[in-house]
Image (cartoon, rainbow, N blue to C red):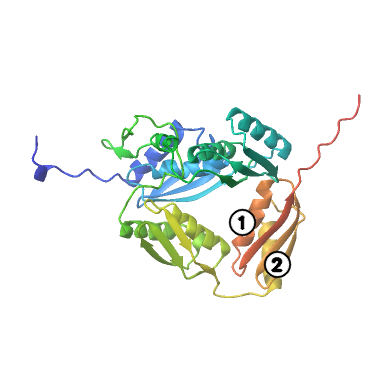
Amino acid sequence: MLPASEIQPPRPASDAELAHAVRRLYAQFPTRTGAAPIRVAVARGIVHLTGFTRHLLGLECAVALAQSVAGVRGVVSELRLRETTVPDAILHRRLTALLTDTRLPYVRVAVQQATVTFTGTVDSWAAKQALLRQAKRLPGVWQVQDQLACPFRLSDADAAWAGHLPAPLTPDGPGAMRRRPTATGAAAEVSPAFSNAQRVPDEDGEQAILDAWQLDSRLGPERPALRVQHGVATLTGAVGTVQARQAAEQDARNAVGIWHVNNHLRVWPRQLPGDEPLRRALQAAQAADATVAALPVHWLLDHGRAIVRGVVPTPFAKTRLAELAGSIPGVLSVVNHLRVQAPERPLLAAA
């Protein structure tokens, strides 16, 4: 056995090895990420994800799986939900059946405009998280609102469930990765709630966030001020767009070792155009996007606040129009008053 002084530390995984490990995880757990092709790029240990997933849980699990690879420092996710429209009545029927199957008699569910709202009481945090995961796994659900109450104390069931989290992947030879065994020897679920629980020095977490911001084109030229203390990232200063403010917070949350983010960023571009130039810019951005160009929506501007009204056929269109508004410099906030209404199917003529 070699003396400790002669043992060489393991070689850090290269960006190519990290990208290979992330892709292999996605292939190993296709249902977690929505069984959709996700493009993976890695630079300086920061994973950049683009593409689509079939359900909300896929957005979260794609990030959690990438974070679970040893050597990954953070994730920049530009993933989107694939356009899937399911009537509210069908979603409600499926979720009601889910509540019956999981024996949660004190939970109620409502569905409106593809948004699921749970109210009532559950007997453990683990049961609550399992229910939310199942709802997010349904194609057609675009948002889940959690208004559930549960006991404050962490139960034995919660601790047992947490023991089934996947362990990080570590290098095992050039170009190969292996999974370190968990305490239970299982990797049954990926939980976004625990995915970022690794402890790293604050200075490493701060540098990971800064590197992620350098790779994220959504932030534009401005860089927020950043301070990390005990795993809590605090963002201050000003950015140019609503999209930049949201992306800066998302990148900070996805840095390994960061468990909470205080976002005190202000949206304040270098130039403040008037409302009429902003309205023209919004109309031009909509016209340039083939997915929403033909939709008859109305843009109203009030001192930099963009208000969009109208009826759109899908939740995807509603989300996309809000994203476009948030990307325009000079728009200080976005108010989305769009209503989703699927077009009626024409009746077949009688033979």
| Circles 2 and 1 in contact, beta carbons < 8 Å | no
Left-right relation of 181 to 115 = left
Q: What kind of residue is marked 1? A: Glu
Give the answer, above or below, for where 323 lies relative to 241.
Answer: above
Looking at the rendered structure, the kind of residue marked 2 is: Arg
**Label 2 Cα crowd, 10 Å radius (few <14 / some 14-19 / many 20+):** few
Number of the label disc, if any, that sits on residue 262: none
Quick one: quadrant of the N terminus? top left
Farthest right residue in view: 351
Left or right position of 258 against 109: left
Q: In the picture shown, does residue 341 fall above or below 330?
A: above
Residue that numbered label 2 is attached to: 280
- Up the image or down, 260 lies above or below 238; here it is above
Instruction: Please state which of residues 326 and 220 is positioned toward the viewer in this rendering.
Output: 326
Q: Secondary structure at mark 2?
A: helix
Q: Position of residue 15 (x, y in %)?
A: 34, 46
Instruction: Note whether residue 218 is visible.
Output: yes
> Mark 1 — residue?
323
- The front one of 11 and 55 is 55
Distance CA(mark 2)–CA(mark 1): 16 Å
Quadrant housing residue 298 = bottom right
Q: Position of residue 112 (x, y in %)?
A: 70, 45
Callout 1: helix, strand or loop? helix
Residue 217 percent location from the top left of the image: 49, 59
Mark 1 residue crowding within 10 angstroms, few (<14) / some (14–19) / many (20+): some
**Who is closer to the viewer here, 195 or 54?**
195
